[in-house]
Image: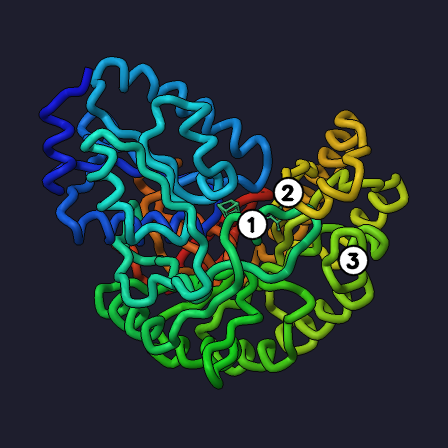
Amino acid sequence: MNDPKFRLAARSGEGKFYLETYGCQMNQNDSEVVAAVMQESGFEYAASPDEADVVLINTCAIRDNAEQRIWGRLAEFRGLKRRRPGLLVGIIGCMAERLKDRLIEREHIVDIVVGPDGYRSLPELVRQAASGTKAVNVLLSREETYAEISPVRLDRNGVTAFVSIMRGCNNMCAYCVVPYTRGVERSRDPETILAEVRDLFERGYREVTLLGQNVNSYRYGEVNFAQLLARVAEVSPLLRVRFSTSHPKDLSDELIDTIAEWPNICRAIHLPAQSGSSRMLELMNRKYTREWYLDRIAAIRRRLPECSISTDLIAGFCTETDEDHVSTLSLMREVGYEFAYMFKYSERPGTKAQRTMADDVAEEVKTARLTEIINLQNELSLASNRRDVGRHFEVLIEGTSKRSTDEVYGRTSQNKVVVLPKMNYLPGDYVHVLITDCSSATLIGTPLC
Ligand code: 5AD
Ligand code: SF4
């Protein structure tokens, strides 16, 4: 059954790996770490599964539909493996951590299962699987931050990059599987972060996004997040700095002041509210109230009047009433979000909500509430974009527009996408742009020369 050629290639470390990524920015960055670990160990990157000896799928477990997509994808790989029995299939990341060896039991084509803290062992496990023994490493770590590994920037535009500054999460929001899949919070040594950022800047990158489940609780020795942010901003005034995600309970005035001090720290804050109802927030174990959240928004508005604010919202969490839902809509209006990620509540096994609360909002009600939330957000995004028409912004060019090769696109400091005529602009250029038109998703601009 086994194709000896492929097995041998992977065993000697000369095989090719194909890598597919689902889920959040953190996962995308993890794939870049995985690519670095694999290449370092002699494996070569393959652009398609057809060329690969091992296919790695970096998975997400945050909602059931994320996992369903991956089951669907695995079914497709079953056909490929039938044609090429020597092909190895690895499931890595959050779903690997959640399901552990049950993945191998349920899905016979899976040869390797590795959780988010086990990536250094991947080459060895691929070789083990190549010699015929299925391989699993789902140990979570208290220390692993992949601090000194230089991520291989896959599919990036050469301008913007993610830099992971911490891993794991200690918050225990009642609905969330992340503390179980990514383990406890740990911060990465700031010197390794700064070295990575300087290297990116020297290679032509002009924007970094500092990543963590809750960047506001970053702490390494004496260095807190506001201090880290200032040190990263200091690398160059030509380097834009973003960060994600902030937890409202930890968004300090010191952080807002630091953003205000540095023009190259972007005027965009992602502040997941999840709900506008204090009763829901309590049940969700978010550790803040609607009033606290609005106070943080007011603090941002006072110091950073030009800052955009985006959020995450969940519709239909356990026991949510129409009144709670209306509170979410009114919070959205009150803040006037520029952008939102909006979800239906999806019960996740092992979470506090699954263990202690009933998932009792009917599916049709969840759908109806989510639709209302999405419709309102479209209105708010359009209104915010309309306010920008006639204003000018500095835009960092990222690449050629998907709509037309005569146009390029980039982003404002506020993280809004702007499309403008190509002229001679190259990715990485800063251009002053007058906004002339918009849709709810995009600004249209013309260069100010
Ligand atoms: N169901 C729906 N949405 C969820 N999120 C996290 N867990 C769940 C869940 N069980 C959302 C939250 C979080 C974002 C990353 O995903 O809004 O901020
Ligand atoms: Fe990212 Fe959470 Fe999905 Fe893991 S479960 S990939 S942390 S969104």
C-alpha separation, residue under disc 3 versus residue under disc 1: 34 Å
Residue placed furthest toward the bottom: 222
Q: Which marked residue is nearer to the observer: mark 3 or mark 1?
A: 1
Q: Nearer the viewer, mark 2 or mark 3?
A: 2
Q: Amino acid at mark 2?
A: Gly
Q: CA distance from mark 1 to mark 2?
A: 8 Å
Q: Are marks 1 and 2 in contact (CB under 8 Å)?
A: yes
Relative to 207, does residue 318 appear above or below in the rendering? above
Q: Please name the amino acid that badge 1 sits on.
A: Tyr
Give the image quarter of residue 318: top right
Please state the horizontal and vertical placement of residue 250, each as a whole percent of the image. Answer: 65, 71
Q: Quadrant of ligand 1?
A: top right
Q: Where is 106 relative to 306, above or below?
A: above
On the image, numbered disc 1 is attached to which residue? 180
Q: Which residue is mark 2?
A: 350
- Residue 152 lies left or right of residue 5; in this view the side is right
Task: Name the residue rendered at 41%, 70% in the picture.
Answer: 188
SS state under label 1: helix
